[in-house]
């Protein structure tokens, strides 16, 4: 709407419990969208809301014998902890429903004035979907088809079965706010329309959310926002696809969910972000043991190269870097930024971006060797590789750990999976060094084979033998 600026609104969580890993696909992806737009020169204002009034919150409060306000406050804090642990950039705005009551009431009032909403006898306000010509344009559905497929609801209040609540009367004991129609609370859909308008005005540039929100939530947001303002609501809609667990939809009732908290305790944030961004945001992403192993191996490759670069830079203290690195490396580097831009400008194609990253890693690995003499050109290669990788890492919120420490952590995880311990392997290697010193090469080879059978690869370098977990 405004040159050089992006107004972006993404639907946030209903705060009544810890979020599962699938809920973080949106925050992880839209963080990249924001970062890429900023890198492309836009000033981005990013709103991500908390739904802090809802049936689920009220039910939870009743179960725990507390207020819905206490539940919402608690789980906003818990969300913030997970969000911080994931290392994502804070949003510009985190509006809540309870602080947006006045704009919500105003928008409902406007919809009634424009004959797009009506008040039932008990004070419930309903949106009349037939009053809005564009209803169904986002989800490409039409009202008659929707009705044919809908359960026939016995709800005398509704003029049309597809009509939905904008404001509903409070039941005894429920939290309530006063309005011209009844003491009650807003319906879920109107909240986002009002929060977006309150921050940005009638039109936003990008509206995002999970693909499960397209219908009815986002369809209803359009009906409310455009129905009350007469202006286009969002110029672009972006929906991230869902995350499945072992091929099945994650659901609490099926018992197959994993909270982000559990994941971060068991694994780490880099693995989750890497896994999610390796798949295009519009594709279904499946969380499985093999997917996890692939992500760990991929991160292992990337961090191994970063660790090698770090070692070379340390060993090159005192050397003055050349203006350019090795020829083969520079050839790939020369087009890398353009390749990244091509991938990202093609609907945020992050898998393609990772292909560029792997090409850079390949070029770097083929240009240097561990333990080699650090020449000005080798130093330049290592420095320029590290800088380029960090630029990508900033955008993706990845590659932020100390490479050596991170590799150690990855190895420990792989060792634990194999039931092995670092100290025992180090002891074996010390034994091997001793027999080698005594020129017992037969025993030395035996030890290497024993370790290989356990999945530990030993290699001899000028600095002595080193081992790594076979990935
Ligand atoms: Zn929403």
Image: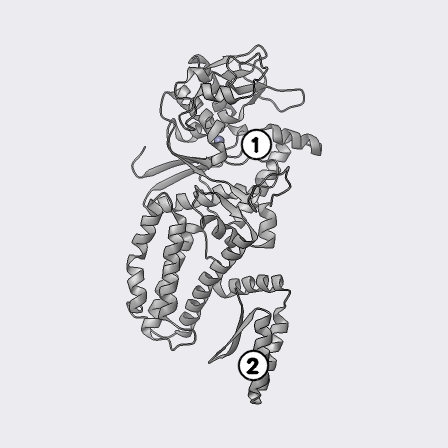
Q: Residues within 10 Å of mark 2 (few under 14, many from 20)?
A: some
Mark 1–mark 2 Cα distance, whole angstroms, equals 64 Å
Tag nearer the camera, 1 or 2 = 2
| Ligand 1 under 8 Å from disc 1 Cβ | no
| On screen, residue 346 above or below 405 | above
User: Residue sitting at 44 percent across and 22 percent down?
Assistant: 224
Q: Horizontal and vertical percent for residue 329?
A: 32, 65
Q: Horizontal and vertical percent for residue 367?
A: 35, 70
Residue 215 in sight from this viewpoint: yes
Residue 105 in sight from this viewpoint: no
Q: Horizontal and vertical percent for residue 106?
A: 47, 19
- In this orientation, which residue lies closer to the viewer: 399 or 322? 399
User: Residue sitting at 36 percent across and 44 percent down?
Assistant: 37
- In this orientation, which residue lies closer to the viewer: 289 or 72? 289
Residue 229 lies in quadrant: top left
Q: Horizontal and vertical percent for residue 362?
A: 38, 64
**First-in-chain label (1 vs 2):** 1
Residue corresponding to mark 1: 52
Q: Residues within 10 Å of mark 1 (few under 14, many from 20)?
A: many
Residue 389 lies in quadrant: bottom left
Helix, strand or loop status at disc 2: helix
Instruction: Name the quarter where the N terminus is drawn.
Output: top left
Residue corresponding to mark 2: 445
What's the colour scheme?
A: one colour
């Amino acid at each position: 709407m405004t040159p050089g600026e992006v107004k972006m609104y993404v639907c946030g969580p209903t705060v009544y419990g810890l979020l599962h890993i699938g809920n973080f696909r949106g925050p992880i992806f839209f963080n990249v969208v924001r970062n890429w737009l900023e890198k492309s020169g836009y000033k981005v204002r990013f709103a991500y809301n908390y739904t802090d009034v809802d049936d689920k919150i009220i039910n939870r409060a009743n179960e725990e014998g507390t207020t819905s306000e206490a539940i919402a406050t608690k789980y906003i804090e818990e969300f913030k902890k997970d969000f911080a642990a994931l290392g994502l950039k804070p949003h510009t705005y985190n509006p809540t429903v309870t602080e947006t009551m006045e704009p919500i009431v105003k928008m409902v009032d406007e919809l009634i004035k424009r004959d797009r909403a009506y008040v039932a006898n008990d004070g419930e306000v309903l949106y009349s979907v037939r009053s809005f010509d564009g209803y169904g344009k986002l989800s490409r559905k039409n009202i008659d088809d929707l009705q044919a497929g809908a359960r026939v609801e016995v709800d005398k209040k509704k003029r049309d079965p597809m009509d939905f609540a904008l404001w509903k009367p409070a039941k005894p004991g429920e939290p309530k706010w006063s309005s011209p129609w009844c003491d009650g609370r807003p319906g879920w859909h109107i909240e986002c329309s009002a929060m977006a308008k309150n921050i940005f005005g009638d039109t936003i540039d990008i509206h995002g959310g999970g693909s499960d929100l397209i219908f009815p939530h986002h369809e209803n947001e359009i009906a409310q926002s455009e129905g009350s303002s007469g202006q286009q609501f969002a110029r672009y809609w972006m929906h991230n696809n869902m995350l499945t667990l072992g091929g099945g939809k994650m659901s609490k009732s099926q018992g197959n969910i994993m909270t982000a908290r559990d994941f971060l305790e068991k694994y780490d944030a880099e693995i989750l972000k890497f896994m999610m961004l390796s798949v295009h945001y519009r594709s279904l992403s499946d969380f499985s043991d093999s997917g996890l192993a692939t992500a760990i191996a991929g991160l292992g490759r990337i961090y191994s190269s970063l660790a090698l670069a770090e070692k070379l830079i340390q060993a090159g203290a005192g050397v003055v870097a050349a203006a350019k690195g090795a020829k083969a490396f520079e050839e790939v580097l020369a087009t890398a930024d353009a390749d990244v831009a091509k991938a990202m400008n093609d609907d945020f194609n992050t898998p393609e971006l990772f292909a560029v990253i792997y090409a850079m890693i390949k070029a770097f690995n083929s240009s240097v060797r561990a333990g080699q003499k650090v020449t000005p050109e080798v130093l330049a290669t290592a420095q320029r590789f590290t800088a380029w990788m960090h630029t990508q890492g900033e955008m993706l919120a990845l590659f932020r750990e100390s490479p050596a420490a991170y590799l150690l952590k990855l190895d420990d995880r792989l060792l634990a999976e194999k039931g092995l311990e670092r100290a025992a392997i180090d002891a074996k290697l010390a034994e091997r060094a001793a027999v080698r010193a005594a020129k017992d090469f037969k025993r030395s080879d035996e030890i290497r084979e024993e370790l290989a059978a356990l999945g530990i690869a030993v290699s001899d370098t000028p600095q002595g033998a080193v081992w790594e977990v076979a990935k």
